[in-house]
Amino acid sequence: MKLKELILSLTFGLMSGGLFSQTTVALTLPVVTLLDVEPTGSFTLNFTAPTEAGQALTAPAANTTKWVNYTSAIASGGLTRRVTASINQVIPGVNIRVQAAAASGAGGGTLGTSSGLVTLSTTASTIITGIGGAYTGNGANNGHMLTISLSVNTYANLSAHINTPVVITYTITE
């Protein structure tokens, strides 16, 4: 009887040893921080002069053609990221404002949250917060739609400007 048990034990032991195997895989997931604004190119916003004395300037319609796209892979235990915006010059008497919409499109992960309507200056202001490991998808209709608008802040500071280029710089950072 003992010989029979020993043979069965050896048989099952040999069979179980051949049923699986293991291998070690080395995996690298790099820290990634990429951002762009789609579609590329510039646009124009022009105030309209009044047609009757005593009337105010008419602000241009807001531009909603630009989208912020990003890819973010943070280090283990790392801080979330944010997107900031700044302008290269201030136009006296004019507010240049941007608002990022909620993320939409083909992305996934921990997408950022809009900071609401932000008036831009030459100092960077946060427009999107809380970006973790995420991607927005690429191109228009993916990521955060930007609404860029102008308004008069102080009429006393206004002076005529023609085709004055203002560059908005977007940065993704921790």
Image: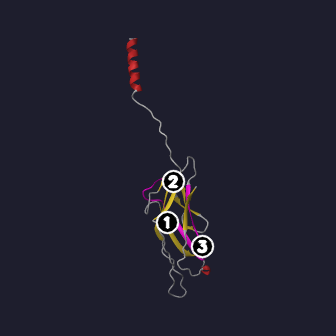
Q: Which percent across, then down, holds residue 126?
A: 57, 62
Q: Is residue 153 above or below residue 55?
A: above
Residue density around tag 2, few if under 14, some if 14–19, many if 20 or more, within 10 Å: many
The residue under label 3 is which amino acid type? Val
Residues at circles 3 and 1 in contact by the CB criterion of under 8 Å? no
Q: Residue at point 51% right, 84% down? A: 50
Residue density around tag 3, few if under 14, some if 14–19, many if 20 or more, within 10 Å: some
Q: Which percent across, then down, holds residue 172?
A: 55, 58
The residue under label 2 is which amino acid type? Ser
SS at circle 2: strand
The residue under label 1 is which amino acid type? Leu
Q: Residue at point 40% right, 12% down? A: 2
Q: Is residue 11 left or right of residue 122?
A: left
Q: Which residue is mark 2?
A: 72
Q: Which residue is mark 1?
A: 146
On residue 90, the disc is 3
